[in-house]
Amino acid sequence: MKGRAHVISFMAVVMVVGIVFSAGCQEEQASPDEQARVAEIAEVKKQARLIAVENARLKKDIATQKQQYEAKLSRQKAELDKCLQDRKALAELSKENIDELMNAVIAMTMEENQKLREENTALKARIDQIGKELEEAKKQATGGSGG
């Protein structure tokens, strides 16, 4: 009997150990709240991955647009510099043309003034001559009839 008691107790110990191990190895059944929470966490992780992919795409788009903007800005700056240079050259050319035109007008005016002075002098001399001739004619007319 003692042997049997040992066997029974050994069997009881093995059963208790088996029950403990099987209870520990069994997966716990998750409650509906826990299942919903796990599903929500999985959805949040999925959305986070999608957001990360979208952020990477947007950063790439921003970098591309920034390069295009900088290239366009550089071209426009070069065009502005060229326009400013052209404007300066035209202003200088215009100033030179105005100076030449003014000098030409002044020269023509001075030449015309000189001609008018000479003509004036000639006319004054002619007037003086006519005046003298008139006086001589008066003298002859009065001297010839009075005498």
Image (cartoon, rainbow, N blue to C red):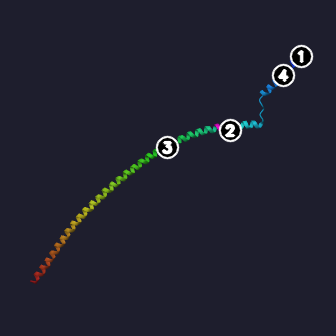
Is residue 88 within the magenta segment? no
Q: Is residue 89 left or right of residue 38?
A: left
For mark 2, give the secondary structure.
helix
* Lower sequence index among marks 3 and 4: 4
* Lower sequence index among marks 4 and 2: 4
- According to the image, label 1 marks what residue? 2
Kindly identify the amino acid type of the residue bearing the numbered disc 2: Val
- In the picture, which quadrant includes the N terminus? top right
Q: Is residue 26 left or right of residue 139?
A: right
Is residue 47 within the magenta segment? yes
The disc label shown at residue 13, or none:
4
Q: Nearer the viewer, residue 25 or 2?
A: 2
Q: Are marks 1 and 2 in contact (CB under 8 Å)?
A: no
Give the answer, above or below, for where 2 lies relative to 70.
above
Kindly identify the amino acid type of the residue bearing the numbered disc 3: Glu
At horizontal 64% and vertical 38% (from top left) the residue drawn is 50
Label 4 or label 1, whichever lies nearer to me, is: 1
Q: Are marks 3 and 4 in contact (CB under 8 Å)?
A: no
At horizontal 25% and vertical 64% (from top left) the residue drawn is 113
Q: Which x, y percent locates residue 84?
A: 41, 50
Label 2 – label 3 distance at C-alpha: 38 Å
Label 1 – label 2 distance at C-alpha: 63 Å
Label 3 – label 4 distance at C-alpha: 81 Å
* Lower sequence index among marks 2 and 3: 2
The residue at the far left in this view is 147
For mark 3, give the secondary structure.
helix
